[in-house]
């Protein structure tokens, strides 16, 4: 259909435009990657090596930096485990209950359905920070201060995840299926768990990844709630690093700690990027 | 068959009750962890309640005094301007580059190779922990950090450039990070919108001999307008919440000369120093501002819902 060599009647020839596009794309890809490349290189170098200048090739201190970080004063291993627990629980609760909410709105024709759907849509963009003050006071009163529980439970009500899943259900979930399940005598709750959830698995997994990453990276709330060192999550520990006396620190340890909190997410992302980038767009295309 | 069908219809009302049951977890959680906190925040904003040294002041009812103090002080406006400057500085390159890349990605006549690779790379910074990313930038741009070392080695500069002592340099770093974290995301959003445009429009334009830039400004842009507005407002809401990057880059101080302090950093100061009244007033102020903005997003979303 489109001929490669056709020149447009006016304007720049296609070959030139393509070359410009590649140059710009390569430039911005470079701009995205260079920081992580330096991070990777510097994680493998010792503090004294780093004071001498930057090298393009890695050195051999990766494991040594790692051991001195793990045996150092920051309980990094605990931070890792805490972050993992919080993020995994958040991801599961958030996607399961958002799917349940989306299913309720999508499937049943109950009274006030439209009003409830509108309400959730309206509260979707309100940021958590504006209710943080009341949230903190409530947490203290409930005796959940300095605990990871209040970082997990609120994920049950996630309007954004609900919105994506509802969009997905609208175009991918035939209601006749629910009818069929009813005729077969399946209870509503069982239908949801055993028939609906497997059907929307692609959308659920994408939302789980987003919920996991969002929780893994979250800094504002954990910093206000967690006070004991061994309960802190990774972002809070990293922020503490910044507060410490910078010049006295072993730079190798700092780089390896940043690397340890960034690279797990990058690895997950590279493995699943096809679904993440696609899923990201899927929610947006509708309409 | 007919018998079964009518039985199903009779049961519809009974089944529809399950809609409410399935909504319980969401609404109970929302009520406890968002709605009650919101009410308590508004309530507390009318009280004087803070610590002065070892002495606890209040809580005493003071009416709208907290709002008068907050909005009357130059502090909040300065921080709002800081936040907006850093947001605009990141957003303008973000939307420009995103538009350009999305246009190229979705242009069938260009047939770019390696699209998946480029999309994967430019979206990646969006998933990076903002606190770790700012810590990384602080290390990279510190006086003896790799960026200065590289610039010295290339003889671009004669002595280390102290990035974090200059207002402009520090702000540009925040803008750069915001740009890097969000331009890939915006590209994918815009691209999804562009791929939805009827290709016969492009073909017709091509037949009529339109240039690439004519097609872009006369066809793509007008159709993309709703998504464009959506991206703008959601980005503004996100920008007003700017916290992690400047907080960690400046260790919470917002230096140099308080020019990196954002509104949420001020809120964070009130929250950590337990100044409940003023923190409450600031929260309500931000709630109203973001509430108005989200109303616009809500409008866009509900028209998109209808289509």
Image (cartoon, grey):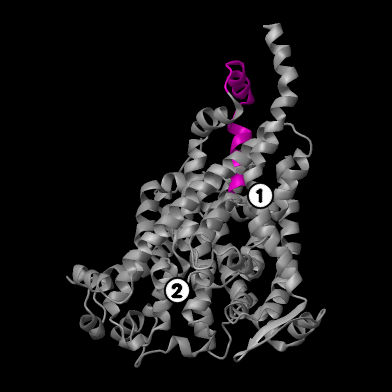
> Against B15, is A138 above or below?
below
Q: Is residue A176 magenta?
A: yes
Q: Chain of mark 1?
A: B
Q: Give the side of residue A247 with respect to residue B165, left or right.
A: left
Q: Which residue is mark 2?
A: B134
From the top left corner, tell me how far across and down residue A284 is, in percent: 60, 47
Q: Give the side of residue A26 with respect to residue B232, left or right.
A: left
Q: Which mark is residue A264?
A: none
Q: Nearer the viewer, mark 1 or mark 2?
A: 1
Q: Residue at x 50, y 83 (%)?
A: B170
| Quadrant housing residue B45 | bottom right
Q: CA distance from mark 1 to mark 2?
A: 36 Å
Q: Quadrant of the C terminus of chain B?
A: top right
- How many residues crowd mark 2 within 10 Å: few (<14), some (14–19), many (20+)? many
Q: Do we see residue A16 in this rendering?
A: no
Q: Secondary structure at mark 1?
A: helix
From the top left corner, tell me how far across and down residue A212 is, in percent: 46, 53
> Against A123, is B139 above or below?
below
Q: Which residue is mark 1?
A: B28
Q: Secondary structure at mark 2?
A: helix
From the top left corner, tell me how far across and down residue B192 is, in percent: 57, 47
**B254 or B220, nearer to the observer:** B254
Upstream in the sequence, badge 1 or badge 2?
A: 1
- How many residues crowd mark 1 within 10 Å: few (<14), some (14–19), many (20+)? some
* Span of residues in magenta: A161-186
> Against A190, is B84 above or below?
below
């Amino acid at each position: 259909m489109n001929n490669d060599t056709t020149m447009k009647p006016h304007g720049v020839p296609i070959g030139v435009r393509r070359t410009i596009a590649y140059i710009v794309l390569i430039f911005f890809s470079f701009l995205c990657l260079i920081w992580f490349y330096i991070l990777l290189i510097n994680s493998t170098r010792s503090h004294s090596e780093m004071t001498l200048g930057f090298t393009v090739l890695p050195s051999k201190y990766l494991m040594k930096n790692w051991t001195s970080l793990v045996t150092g004063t920051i309980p990094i291993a605990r931070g890792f485990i805490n972050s993992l627990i919080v993020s995994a629980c958040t991801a599961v609760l958030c996607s399961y209950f958002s799917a349940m909410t989306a299913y309720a709105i999508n499937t049943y024709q109950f009274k006030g359905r439209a009003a409830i759907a509108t309400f959730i849509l309206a509260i979707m963009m309100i940021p958590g920070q504006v209710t943080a003050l009341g949230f903190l006071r409530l947490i203290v009163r409930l005796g959940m201060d300095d605990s990871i529980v209040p970082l997990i439970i609120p994920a049950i009500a996630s309007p954004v995840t609900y919105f994506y899943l509802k969009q997905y259900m609208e175009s991918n979930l035939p209601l006749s299926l629910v009818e069929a399940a009813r005729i077969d005598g399946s209870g509503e709750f069982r239908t949801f768990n055993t028939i609906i959830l497997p059907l929307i698995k692609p959308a659920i997994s994408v939302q789980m990844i987003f919920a996991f990453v969002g929780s893994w990276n979250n800094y504002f709330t954990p910093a206000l709630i967690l006070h004991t060192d061994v309960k802190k999550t990774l972002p809070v520990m990293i922020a503490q690093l910044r507060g410490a006396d910078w010049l006295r620190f072993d730079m190798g340890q700092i780089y390896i700690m940043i690397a340890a909190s960034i690279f797990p997410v990058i690895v997950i992302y590279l493995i699943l990027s096809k679904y993440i980038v696609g899923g990201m767009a899927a929610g947006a295309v509708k309409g | 068959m007919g018998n079964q069908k009518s039985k199903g219809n009779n049961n519809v009302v009974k089944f529809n009750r399950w809609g409410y049951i399935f909504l319980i977890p969401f609404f109970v959680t929302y009520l406890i962890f968002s709605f009650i906190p919101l009410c308590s925040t508004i309530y507390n904003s009318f009280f004087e309640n803070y610590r002065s040294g070892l002495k606890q002041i209040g809580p005493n009812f003071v009416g709208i005094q907290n709002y008068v103090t907050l909005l009357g002080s130059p502090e909040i406006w300065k921080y709002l301007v800081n936040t907006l400057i850093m947001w605009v500085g990141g957003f303008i390159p973000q939307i420009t580059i995103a538009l350009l890349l999305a246009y190229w990605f979705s242009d069938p006549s260009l047939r770019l190779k390696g699209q998946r690779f480029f999309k994967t790379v430019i979206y990646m910074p969006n998933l990076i922990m903002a606190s770790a990313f700012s810590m990384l930038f602080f290390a990279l741009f510190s006086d003896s950090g790799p960026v200065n070392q590289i610039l010295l080695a290339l003889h671009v500069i004669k002595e280390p450039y102290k990035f974090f002592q200059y207002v402009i340099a520090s702000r540009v770093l925040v803008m750069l990070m915001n740009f890097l974290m969000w331009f890939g995301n915006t590209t994918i959003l815009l691209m999804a919108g562009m791929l939805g445009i009827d290709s016969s429009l492009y073909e017709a334009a091509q037949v009529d001999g339109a240039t690439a830039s004519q097609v872009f400004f006369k066809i793509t842009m007008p159709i993309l307008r709703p998504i464009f507005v959506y991206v703008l407002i959601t980005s503004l809401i996100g920008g007003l919440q700017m916290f992690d990057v400047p907080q960690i880059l400046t260790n919470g101080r917002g230096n140099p000369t308080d020019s990196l302090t954002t509104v949420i950093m001020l809120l964070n100061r009130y929250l950590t120093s337990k100044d409940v009244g003023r923190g409450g007033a600031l929260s309500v102020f931000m709630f109203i501002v973001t509430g108005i903005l989200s109303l616009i997003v809500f409008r866009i979303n509900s028209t998109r819902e209808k289509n």
